[in-house]
Image (cartoon, grey):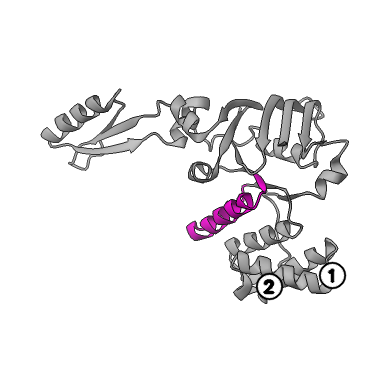
Amino acid sequence: MDVIDVRGLGKTYPGGTVALRDVSFRVARGEVFCLLGRNGAGKTTLLRILATQLRRTAGSAAVLGQDVDAGATSIRSRIAVVPQEARPQMMMSAYDHVRLMCRIRGLSKEAAEKRTRSLLEELELWDHRDKIAADLSGGLRQRILLCMALVGEPELVFLDEPTIGLDPLGRRKVWAMVRRLTKSGGTVLLTTHYMDEAERLADRLAIVEKGRLAFLGTVDAAKARAGGGMRVVVEHPGGNGEREVLEPKDDAEILAVVQKSLSQGLRVTLQPTSLEDAFIAIVGGSIEEDAA
C-alpha cells in the first residue's frame, strides 16, 4: 500500500495566492522521499497538507490510506512532524524533553524512562541528558526534537529542512537516523535545500517549481535530464581564474579533450553531473532564488 497518495492537489490561500497546482505523486512504504524547490515554491505548503496541518482546496490526498481531512485525527496518531521552525524549551534538559513527550503519548513512568534512554542513546544524546537546551549546540537541539518525534514509533515522519544550520557531523547523524527509520519499516518525507543531502538520502524526489511538479523520479533520472554524463573542466594554470566547462558526448571524446588540454599545459578536472546541475536544468536559476 502507498503511504502517501496525492492526486491533482491544489492549494489557494485567501486573497488568491496559488501555492500548489495539480500536484500528483505517490510514496511507497519504506521510502525516503525528498521535496526540492526554491524558496516559495510550495514545498512546505505541500508538507503541511499531508501532515494534516493545512486544508487543501483542490484534488485529493491520502496518508496511510486515509483522507487527510476526514481522517486527520487517526493519521496524527501514526505520524510525526518536525517543522523547520520548531525549537526545544531552552530551560529544560534533553532527558526531560523526551520523557515528557513519552508521558504525553501515554507511556507509563517505567516505560517512559526506558523509551527515553533508548532514544537518547540512539541519537547519541545520552551523555548530554542532564544539560538544558540553552547549553547545547544547534545540532544537539535538533536531535532532541527528532527524539521527541520518534517517541510514538511513527509509521511516517515529515521533516522540514531537518539539517539546516547543522555542522557536517550533525548532518550525518541525522542522515543515519533517517536511514535507520526506513530500515525498520518507516517512511520519511523531507524537504531540503541541500543537494548533497537529497542525493545521499532520496530513493525518489520531486522538484516543485511555482506550485507545480517540475520533476518526479530518482536522482539518476534527474541527472539524466542534465545530460547525465561527465563534464571536463579546463583551467589555465596561471591563476587568472579562466576556466572552460566542456560536455563531451562519449568516453572517446572525453579522452581526446583531456589529452589535448594536457598537451597544452592546461589543468583538467573531470566532474560527474550533480543533482544541482539537474535542478538548474529542470527549473533554471539556483535553489536559493525566491520564486517569482
Pointer 1: what residue? 108
Q: How many marks?
A: 2
Above or below, 23 relative to 191: above
The quarter of the picture where the N terminus appears is top right
Range drawn in magenta:
161-188
How packed mark 1 is, by other alpha carbons closer than 10 Å (few <14, some 14-19, many 20 or more), is few
Above or below, 237 relative to 101: above
Q: What is the three-letter code of the residue carrying label 1?
A: Ser
- Residue under the image location 65 percent in, 45 percent down: 188
Residue 257: where, in percent of width, then height?
Answer: 20, 28
Residue 40: where, in percent of width, then height?
Answer: 64, 34
- Image mark for residue 132: 2
- Residue under the image location 59 percent in, 56 percent down: 177
The quarter holding residue 245 reads top left
Element type where label 2 sits in the image = loop
Q: Depth check: 60 or 145 in front? A: 60
The quarter of the picture where the C terminus appears is top right
Q: Nearer the viewer, mark 1 or mark 2?
A: 1
The quarter holding residue 227 reads top left
Element type where label 1 sits in the image = loop
Query: As drawn, is 44 to the left or to the right of 284?
Result: right
Q: Distance between the residues labelled 1 and 2?
A: 24 Å
Residue 182 magenta-drawn? Answer: yes
How packed mark 2 is, by other alpha carbons closer than 10 Å (few <14, some 14-19, many 20 or more), is some
Can residue 91 be seen by looking at this rendering?
no
